[in-house]
Amino acid sequence: MNKPYFYVTTPIYYVNDKPHIGHAYTTILADVLARYYRSLNIPSFFLTGTDEHGQKVQKAAEENNMTPQEQCDTTVTRFKELWERLEITNDRFIRTTEPGHKEIVQKVLQSLFDQDLIYRDEYSGHYCVPCERFYTAKDLDENMLCPECKREVQEIIESNYFFRMSKYQDWLIQYINDNPDFIQPSFRANETLGFLKKPLGDLCISRPKSRLSWGIELPFDTDYVCYVWFDALINYISGIGYGSDEESFTQWWPASYHLIGKDILTTHTVYWPTMLKAMGLEMPKTIFAHGWWLTGRSKMSKSLGNVVNPMEMIDKYGLDAFRYFLMAEMTLGQDASFTEDAFITRFNSDLANDLGNLASRVIKFTLRSCDGTVPELGPEGPEEAELAEALKSAETEMEKALLDMRLEQGIEQIMNAVRAGNRYMEQTAPWSLAKKGETEKLNTVMNRAADLLWRVSVLLSPIMPDKMRELRSCLGFPADADFTINDITSGDTVIAGNKVSDTGGLFQRIQVKEEPKQEKKQTKKDKPKAEAKKSEDKTGTNLVTFDEFFKTQLKTAKVLEAEKIEGTDKLLKLQIDVGGEQRQLVAGVAEYYKPEEIIGKTIVIVANLKPAKIRGVESQGMLLAAKDADGLKLITVDGYVASGVSVG
Ligand code: MSP
């Protein structure tokens, strides 16, 4: 029988630099998941920490005139401070320089060496310091740069130790094929399988101390230290007691989720499973790779100066709004764009207009017309049934969203319930019920509206713990009253008789200052431009602004595979490559293109469309085509263009 438990990990972060939004995002995501599972009364363990060895950290220490240990000790406090500020509820923070972790890494190394799963050999290759990865010449890109980060690599020839990773290639392919949940989203499993099409080499797991001294010494050769990834991945088991506390280890292993960013897929889906297999341990249940936060449409990078600083955002807009934005805005698995404009738009619509407005209406009206006390529930009618329906669907969809890792969809359902709450207030108009003296109906309305807010506050608590506590306190619950999701799904209402209070608004709308107009005075000639500002032109066509248009990301994509979806005449299932990312699309083109006619074509897709299931098959985007009386033609590009290139 499966024991119900939840063990979630984040990557452990390099301590060469201060934390940024990417680190904050995965850690908040893990925190939100852990809080949800705890709220469902499922025993949970949440591990995060820092990756403190390797060349990257040693180099940063040199640049900062510190010893590597000083570099680690200084930077680790930045991470710990940020986690405290973000109210991260991890159960353990692991540092790979802890003696306990080092001991386990050495035990693993010795045991694999004793079983001849580690051997010594001559090595020649190319090393990328930022990625801490070795590549063969064939792996490098056309400019002989790192295939991952496109930076320069160092050529290295030396004697080293190797883990017999190649031995597990066939097993790993089979395992991935047999376990669809193992690597999520599924296109990342395809990406790993694509990587495994090439022969898998053995993994170099040592560095001679003469070149790099900052690492865990190999127990069987003191001239070498362990490769940083081999050391780091072991944190996922050493952090829960592998080799030191068997009871804890058996309670939490295998992990429910290893959350990672898409750039560290191969280390987690190839190195780590083969290492575990060699150790005779079970595989994690799911390795989930999320996308990247971009600034607008560009990659965040220090040199471009467009990296979002989490601390600044929290100082400006508050912690809970920041956590909410990150969880609601990113479609799990896809890239998302972080701009202050997008942040303000979402804040104002979801938090200020919908949730904040409902809370303020209910609290103010209860204070004014119900003596400040939530009334007893009176007779219910169809409006109440409709409201209950919206709430039920928020509860069930949120649980489903957790299981499917579609948090943003769960949040959307909760916000739908909030919107239903605002509609309910408008339809039932408690202010006129009060005027007409219809007390029984009024009591029902104010009881249901307050009850909805209470339930929503519990559902959103894992995302906005402080604000939702504040909301409950306004609704008359003691500040320390902790409710679980089980409390709200039981159906019982506990709110009647509560004394409400007004703390002056949960979320104040963010006022956006109008940019000073740079346009020159309008002349006759300019008139059409000005007219274009309206949403329609003379022919009645809807006009969009540049900004609106660019919300839709159009990209080129190469079709890798195509097959008909069984039981349909119109649909093809495509595997496409979008700049190195493999995705699946469902396209209604089967009547016009045979699978073999579409394979190899460079098409244009909408890349930021919410994934949807079509006939039960997931589609991560939409292709563009034009159709007239003669049939349908795909939109393609005129000549060679790489895949993943923006169109527009
Ligand atoms: N130390 C390794 C992980 C070892 S896990 C056994 C490492 N550390 S890291 O500090 O460089 O990166 C940590 C995570 O930050 C990665 O998952 C990476 O995907 C994520 N991000 C870095 N920039 C990001 C964005 N702009 N957006 C989202 N996440 C991104 O790799």
Image (cartoon, rainbow, N blue to C red):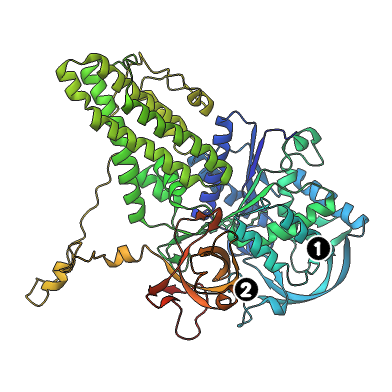
175 vs 33: above or below: below
Foreground: 101 or 524? Answer: 524
Q: Earlier in the sequence, mark 1 or mark 2?
A: 2
Q: Quadrant of the C terminus?
A: bottom left
Side (left or right) of 159 relative to 462? right
Q: Position of residue 152 (x, y in %)?
A: 61, 76
Q: Secondary structure at mark 1?
A: helix
Q: Position of residue 424 (x, y in %)?
A: 29, 31
Q: Which residue is mark 2?
A: 147
Side (left or right) of 213 relative to 395? right
Q: Which mark is residue 77?
A: none
Residue appearing at x 72%, y 33% in the figure: 3
90 vs 222: above or below: above
451 vs 580: above or below: above
Q: Is residue 462 visible?
A: yes
Q: Which residue is mark 1?
A: 170
To which quarter of the image does residue 425 belong? top left
Amino acid type of disc 1? Asp
Q: Position of residue 155 (x, y in %)?
A: 71, 78
Side (left or right) of 296 relative to 108? left
